Amino acid sequence: MSVIRSLCILILSFAGCSPISQETGIAREPSEADCIVWEGKHAIDLRTGEALWQIRTKEPWQGVCSEIAGSDVFLETQERELQRRRLTDGQIVWSVPAFSSEDYKVNEYPDFPTIAATEHVVLHAAQRRMKAHDRESGKLLWSQSLEPGGSRALLVRDHHVFIPGVPSMLDLRTGRTLWTTEENVNTAAYLPNGDLMVSLYDGVACLSGIDGRVLWKTRMSREPGSTLFAGQYLVAGSKADDDNAWAAVWDGSSGKQLWFSSGKHPTAAALSEDGETLYLGRWDHRKQEEAVDILAVDTRTWSLRWAELGELDGMVLLPVGRRVFVAEFVPTSFSTKFYCLSARDGSRLWIGKLEGIEVPHTLYGQGAELQRRGSWIALIDVQSAGSFVQAFQIHDGKPVSKWRFENK
């Protein structure tokens, strides 16, 4: 599910949001490309780092379920309303009721919903129900009950939507179930032909997008610790605390294992824009030194192009032309690093100067997201407290703007 997140500083009325008027020295109004959204409720102008609008929540650190699609942001408020808002100023286009309390519950506890938007339809899923609304008007098109349990990620392709946690394929236009599978699906991603690469609790596989048949399957003696998808490739590996660490790459269509390494488990994977290089981040929990590395693997020969050392066990990779952008983080700390490597040889081109806060340890989770915006690269530091968003020039890493979440 790709998600753009946004940010804001102004505290607005509890019922909604309103534009922030500030002198920026920039004449034109922000475009869609200028806006970044964090946690579904904060919007900023990437050109200046200034707040555009904000939705208030009961607790400042609480996020909002949201999806950005073109000039719109679709979100579920804490008052359980599904809203369509304009991305640049937060104005409400329409608002409709979301779900009943029972629809959110699994094992008697509420679970976070998900949203996905296409050109014509907005999908909204809770644990026990999914609805489809007309994107233009908000009119309810259909409502379908779901079996509770598992991920509510929504994978949309053409007129179909696959829900890994059910797992079922539905007709996007009617909500009719096209097929279900007995496979215990954890995560999934579409192949170019519409079939589905899937991670299972006992291995990895590929399902037919037409009828859900298992096209190939590889069982493992132990549950894979992480499964990543990069283009047509499926990357799986050992759990983070497994002493017999390993990482492997499969061709998603044929199920052929293309590459294998031992000693480290995979933390990140990304495919170059030309499809000729697969970048992998790996980590060995047993080591203090040289525990993290980044590999560039030639997908034509599956030989190693280059390898560089990293530092932190959490990682996000974003290849852009002749550059590879790397964000590193520690899942239980506010430490974050951001830098740019040469795609040719892995040499470090520049290091981003971050303006967020750093503390030794926290109980809050942490992550990171990278987005390209024209000649800029944006780092969204997704922490439960102390989060920040910064934009940098792609070619030299010079800061463009910065914004930091104030937990108050």
Image (spheres, grey):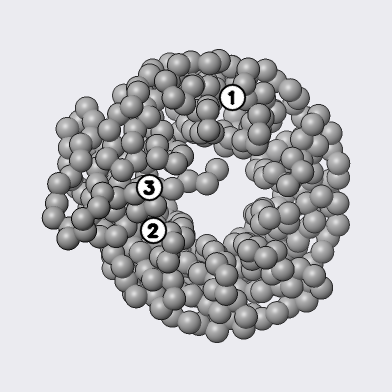
Question: Could you tell me residue 208's position as x and y percent?
Answer: 80, 37
Tell me the kind of residue under disc 1.
Pro
CA distance for labels 2 and 3: 20 Å
Question: Could you tell me residue 266's position as x and y percent?
Answer: 64, 63
Tag of residue 148: 1
The residue labelled by disc 2 is 381
Instruction: Please state if 271 lies on the left or on the right of 94 as rendered.
Output: right
Q: Counting other residues with Cα less than 10 Å from the Cα at mark 3, is it few (<14), some (14-19), or many (20 or more)?
A: some
Asked if the residue at tag 1 contacts the one at tag 3, i.e. Cβ–Cβ closer than 8 Å, the answer is no
Q: Counting other residues with Cα less than 10 Å from the Cα at mark 1, is it few (<14), some (14-19), or many (20 or more)?
A: some
| Vertical side of 81 occupied by 43: above or below | below
Which quadrant holds the N terminus? Answer: top right
The residue labelled by disc 3 is 32
Seen from the viewer's position, the closer of residues 169 and 222 is 169
Q: Earlier in the sequence, mark 2 or mark 3?
A: 3
Task: Answer yes or no: is residue 262 visible.
Answer: no
Seen from the viewer's position, the closer of residues 335 and 76 is 76
